[in-house]
Image (cartoon, grey):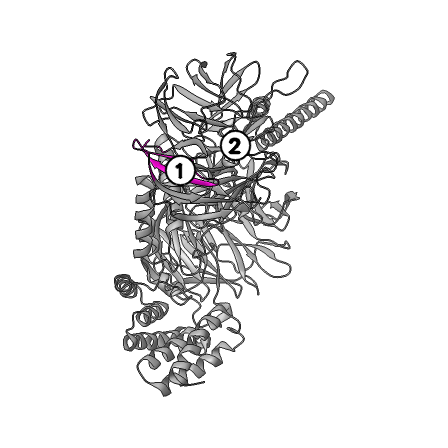
Amino acid sequence: ATTSYWALRAESRADHLQREAYRASIAAAQSSLDRGQAGAAREYLARAPEPLRGLEWRYLDQLVDRSDRTLDLSKPGESGQQTFTSAALSGEFAFMHNDDVSVLLNWKTGDRRTSTSKAAISTPYALSISPRGDRFVVCGEMTSALWNMHPLALIKQFDSEPRFESSAFTPDGSTLVMGLTIPRRIDFIEADTGATRHSMPVQGVQRAFPSLSPDGSRVLVESKDGVTAMFRLPECSAAWEFPGVQPRFSPDGRRVLLYSGLRQMVPRVHVLDADSGRENFSLPLEDNLVGAGGASSSIVGMSPDCSMLAHLTMSGEIRLISDSDLSTIGVLSGLGPRIGGIYNGVAFSDDGRWLAAHSRGHEIKVWNIQRSAVWMQASTKEELPSIAAAISPGASRSVTCNWGQIVAWDLKTGAPIWAAYPSFEFFSAIETSQRCDRIFVGGDRGTVLVLDADSGEVLRSAAPHGAMPFGANWTRSLAFGMDPPCLLAGFADGTVTHLDPITVEPRRQHSVGNAPVIALQPSPSGRRFACIVGGKPARVRVFAGESDLPELDLEIPGAASLAWTHDESLLAVGHTGGIQIVEPSGEPRIHIQGLRGTPTCLAFTADASRLVAGTNDGSLGIWFVHSGDLALDLPLPRREPALATAIRGDEQAIHVVTTGGATVAFETSKPDELTARAREAARNGRALYRRCKTIGGFLPETLELIGRAAGVHADARQEATRIARMLCEHPATLNNQAYSGTEHPPDEATLRLALRQNEAAIARCPDAFGLLTRGKVLHRAGRFAESLEALRRAAEQLAAIRPNWGEGPPELAALRGLCEAELGHVNEARKWFVTFDRIAESSRYKGSEEAARYGRMVAEARVKIGSR
């Protein structure tokens, strides 16, 4: 017995040490990735004990290959000093030089090529790669040189001059275009030998350091003091001039970037139309842009699709700037403060997914833009944050809802599948059926809708609590499950109703408390369900079968989320600052503490060894169930709160839906090429749609801007068009935004389409809020008599299903008065305006957005009819 005791104790001690070693390896690997040290991360992952490797290990392992990284440029010299202090960047390449060696580095792959050719290139600052990929030319402070790339060998060094600003090669790569100041001319140089083919004098030019357009038909040079001129080739005729220096073309050749105000230390970057020389926009950079460095053209770069500018600031941070509205859409950090301008560089990879920068700090920092940018804007002004979300069983799609809008998303590609606006209601809960053939949505007025999961068509609408007071109608939570299958609906009055999933008719009802039911979770077998009853403190209760008495009743302050293990042996309860895991009997198993924020969604792995928790502070944690230790902590995009999380059946991915509508997949394996392309098209299409979406969200103007967008791949344009037709063609777009001061009212075609869709929705599912929507759209269309009739019917139906509604929402009275005024019925209009005033001053609506918005419209109408 003694021997067995000590053997078990030794085994337990060994298991404990192995778990500690595993956690340490995971933590060290994640820390290394955060610092950009992918090699070190790989070493730490290799040390992790194989038997314990799970989700978090597989996720970090595949992330190593596409993580941010830091490439060291330093090389100890004889005196121990660092010898590479500058790097010229162009596309995916960087060039460094010292007295002993020249290095060409592919910063995306890490491939280095070295040469000991005696080329005197001090402080390289400009680099141009031949389109053929066999030559490159580099400019330093005093000299320039032409190099062969395979192998790295010096072809010719140009003493003192000629030099170039950027983009030195012609499109076929056969000719190098460089400029001289004395005499002022542009030389066309043979790229294979470095011999000058011919020269072209340029009169009245101050610095003949050219930037060649991508198609080789135009060249930019600085003409007069502080002025850039564009010349057409080969005739060298001047096309236009613009105040500014250090010019270069955008990747698509349609725009020109140049700078002004450098001497006055009030710099701006200007973006011009390349054909006309007219300014598209300009952007103030930061004071003392140049500092001690001199040139500054290298600190601003444009992405290959021309949708984004990257600005390397003095602090070392890189601002990602939207080309559409000049807003800062993201920030990349990790680089030290830069010195001046000439010794720095910023460059995008050819596919636009990576960004590299150098700040005279002996290293190049490389970012994976999609993973690393701390996005500051979650959505455009017209888009509302999601209120609730659900992920289907099998994690094939997700659904989100907010004010009046429901959207289904493909989890494989991240693309929206359909959007629906079934009624004018604030949706507060959403769920999918087990087979994912139906979507259930609950609203703030007690309505429960059933939608077809493939099309978004409304199949059924019901108000199980229609006769109850307004405050108790709020559908706070939905869950699908139980045996036989049913929909559980939790309401704000503390009741849980079992609804038929087809007819939405009530089967039975539980009174679970006197506070809102904020979460519901049926067990996998369907024999019981857990719920959280809000209040101070919150309570977690479990009900089984037909019983109205809970078989488990726990007081857990701040409880917010629930999850069962697959075998129902454990129930996890997320609460403020922690997670409590208990057995069905209520016996505590383990209490995880120290979380930032509150876990808003939970999911167990199939073997119940790990628990995934998304929080309201924008993080996702993977926790060991047996010990309560944190295995991995992952930040969510823009630190948005998590709404729903699920582990894919094969445990190859964790899916999280955030309030910004983003569906994030933390995958343990790389996607195949087809999926990667589909994701890229979906991402680029959604970004293009957001840039082009007009004020008010109306389709014709949005489609026109999408069609005119320059430098956009056909797949992205097609996807943006599909999204626009999906999100711009619904009545609720007008319903929610037509009265928000939009400058561009909808055209007749859009209004007709909105009315047709509204008629179809009402025919499928009679809804008082659909009639209210119809009245608003008809008013906007100028069909005031028809609008009055729709509003009258809406008021009657609202009164029938909501006895305690009173006089209804403020927009109902306001719109009826506005229509009467337009029809010349002044007295009727005044009566409705008085009613509106009374509703707007009521405790329910006083200070609300509706009262303010329609109050402005009523005030304008009163002036028109001579009423006060």
Residue placed furthest toward the bottom: 827
Instruction: Inspect this view and state whether residue 564 appears.
Output: no
Q: Nearer the viewer, residue 610 or 68?
A: 68
Amino acid under disc 2: Gly
Q: Residues within 10 Å of mark 2 (few under 14, many from 20)?
A: many
Which residue carries the number 2 mark? 345
Numbered range of the magenta stretch: 213-238
Residue that appears at 37% across and 38% down:
230
Q: Nearer the viewer, residue 350 or 542?
A: 350
Where 742 falls versus 238 (above or below)?
below
Q: Which quadrant holds residue 805? A: bottom left
Residue that appears at 48% across and 37% down:
369
Which residue carries the number 1 mark? 250
Locate residue 710, reporting x and y percent.
34, 43
Q: Which quadrant holds residue 251? A: top left
Q: Quadrant of the N terminus?
A: top right
Residue that appears at 33% across and 62% down:
731
Locate residue 592, reporting x and y percent.
64, 43
Q: Which quadrant holds residue 412? A: top left
Where 173 falls versus 464 (above or below)?
above
User: Is label 1 in a helix, a strand or a loop?
Assistant: loop
